[in-house]
Image: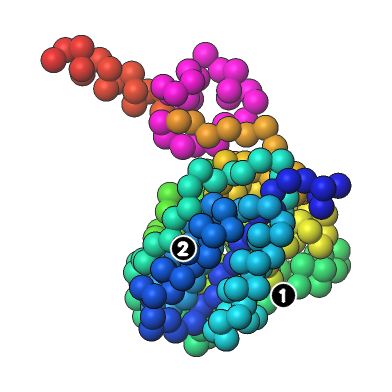
Amino acid sequence: MNNIKKITNVTGYKFTKISNKHSLKDKILSECNRYNLKGTVLISDKGINFSIAGNNRNIDKFIKFIKNDSRFVDIDIKTTYNEYQPFRKMLVRIKKEIISMGIEDINPSEFTGEKIDPLDLVKRLDKDEDIILLDTRNEYEVRLGTFENSIDLDLDSFRDFPEQIDNLKDTLVNKEIVMFCTGGVRCEKASALMIKNGFTNVKQINGGIINYFKKTGGKYWNGDCFVFDDRVALDKNLEETEYKLCFRCREPLNKEELMSDLYKIDEYCPYCYEDVMVKNQLSNLN
């Protein structure tokens, strides 16, 4: 079914030294425009991170192009499919970090947490082994779905992660921790930071939630998975769900929230309604 859909979506990242950021940016943008691809590519001194979409033939050409660079020959790529282009433009940006955590001396190309294959994780969960599952994603992502009995750090931003792990040290520093995020890039940095801070047994799901769904069907997972494009969320079969984003605050909304009296298209939703009402009242007073 997937391979007959019109649009191929690929995400990939690689932590590696990049000394030619500006010329690489120009080359990638030129190739993406050449093949009519859309999405976002982030480049920093320490790596590359991308999410792009287009027809399958042109995506294959892009992957061949990116892997022709020796730095990216083994880049980890996840693929999903859908009926329409989920990005509105093509952006290639140079950033200080390809995933922002706010700590400059963490470099996953030098060391990071051991990767565990999704099938191996399921086998161990089937045996009820003593594993701590740690969600490194933002609160609005966790709200859509997460692993059974996982730890939610209630993050507003990934930049809050360093502060939150300090609260885990007393109880989890010697526990086996398996962390997870959408595609794996956040876990690369998060696991490196935890190891640097003395956690002794830190692992990460190889390929993130997307790869876990693909290889296991989402066993032990409740709900869906947020993705950073117009599809908003994917289910365990990697199919688009009915979630929509609030135009104002960008919170993901389920069917019930979209039918709420506190939702008005392009104006507010249950998560920003009160803020909008307060601002309107202040505006009327003025």
Scheme of colours in the image: rainbow
Residue at the spot of label 2: 29
Which residue lies at the image location 81% right of the left edge and 62% below the top edge?
A: 215
User: Residue 128's x, y, as percent?
Assistant: 81, 65
- The residue carrying pointer 1 sits among few (fewer than 14), some (14 to 19) or many (20 or more) residues within 10 Å by Cα, namely some
Residue at the spot of label 1: 116
Of the pair 92 and 165, the residue shown nearer to us = 92
Please tell me the numbered disc located at residue 57. none
| Mark 1 vs mark 2: in front | 2
Q: What residue type is labelled 1?
A: Ile
Left or right: residue 107 compared with residue 3: left
Q: Is residue 266 magenta?
A: yes
The tally of labels here is 2
User: Residue 150's x, y, as percent?
Assistant: 65, 56
Q: Taking 87 as reference, is 32 above or below it?
A: below
- The residue carrying pointer 2 sits among few (fewer than 14), some (14 to 19) or many (20 or more) residues within 10 Å by Cα, namely many
Left or right: residue 104 compared with residue 206: left
In the rendered structure, which segment of residues is drawn in magenta?
248-271
Of the pair 260 and 78, the residue shown nearer to us = 78
Q: What residue type is labelled 2?
A: Leu
Which residue lies at the image location 27% right of the left edge and 17% below the top edge?
A: 280
User: Residue 174's x, y, as percent?
Assistant: 59, 78
Q: Earlier in the sequence, mark 1 or mark 2?
A: 2
